Image (spheres, rainbow, N blue to C red):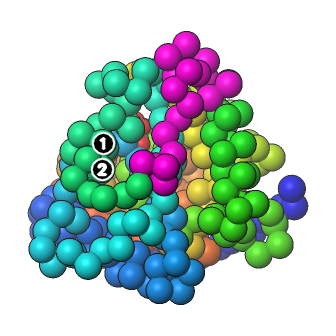
Amino acid sequence: MASYSVNTKREKKVFDTEDDVAKAMAEYTFNLSKKFCKKRGYFTIVLSGGDLVLWLKKLLVPEYAETEWSKWHVFWVDERVVPLDDKDSNYKQTLDSFLSEVPIPTSNIYAIDQNCAALGDAKGAAIVYEECIKRLVNQNIIRTYKSSGFPQFDLQLLGMGPDGHMASLFPGHYQIKEKASLVTYITNSPKLPPKRITFTLPVINCASYNLMAVCGEAQADAVAKVFKDDFNLPSARLTADTQAIWYLDKTAASKLPSECL
Ligand SMILES: O=C1O[C@H](COP(=O)(O)O)[C@@H](O)[C@H](O)[C@H]1O
């Protein structure tokens, strides 16, 4: 696979409340779904776990009734290697709160391999997920970024932990440096559960649109470090092909240096 290079400027919008962030994220998603469904007949969207799972519910309002759910293809930027019915599964949490409410064909929802998940086989799960992505690239459901061969998703919705991790790329762990694979794994994640699979940084940064949504005081220090370009934090490395935008609530933005406001 060839190397990739994307260097979009980091943008941000600050909202009063978490509810405002969630609503704005839904609007952003709806507009991009409309754009890509019209342009290519598919919308490839990558989800995260964490707080974001509940915010997706804002897409379930009458305003967005025209969403072409049948054209959605849903992926996860990271997943915990636990059985698919475990409360820690990003898939299960998203299914319970959002996916079960919308008519996306089951075959368009790409969960972690259930056998590997049940066995706790993180390496196997990463290999199978990577094969799945490559198959969908061959079927032209996922585009590729220019001539690099890296998959290019239409939109990724991301979150950041208080330590600055995004997906399951944690500060000080070698996975952030992985450049050859599309999907890698970790077995000693500082945030539990310890076994996870995750897209690698090149895949994350090749997406057309990356929306990072962060709310709450616990993340305020990390947000300030990101906007001071502290690249020890994996989230500071987030770019995109077209737009990398941060949606913050006031508390998450409260420690931003004045030059960033
Ligand atoms: O463990 C995870 O954490 C991050 C951040 O979650 P948040 O609750 O702090 O927003 C999440 O993006 C990732 O998908 C998840 O596996």
Identify residue for label 2: 99
Residue located at (58% from left, 52% from top) = 231
Q: Is residue 243 above or below residue 196?
A: below
Can residue 233 be seen in the rendering of this structure? no
- The local secondary structure at tag 2 comes to helix
Residue 109, how many percent across, how many down? 46, 49
Residue located at (52% from left, 56% from top) = 236
Residue located at (87% from left, 61% from top) = 2
CA distance separating discs 1 and 2: 4 Å
Front-most of 156 and 114? 114
Taking the view exactly as shown, the residue that stands out farthest to the right is: 2
User: Mark 1 near ligand 1 (CB under 8 Å)?
Assistant: no
Identify residue for label 1: 95
Around disc 2, counting alpha carbons within 10 Å, would you say few (fewer than 14), some (14 to 19), or many (20 or more)?
many
> How many badges with numbers are in the image?
2
Q: Which mark is residue 43?
A: none
Q: Main secondary structure of the magenta part?
A: helix
Magenta segment, which residues? Answer: 106-125
Determine whether, in the image, residue 239 is placed left or right of residue 131: left
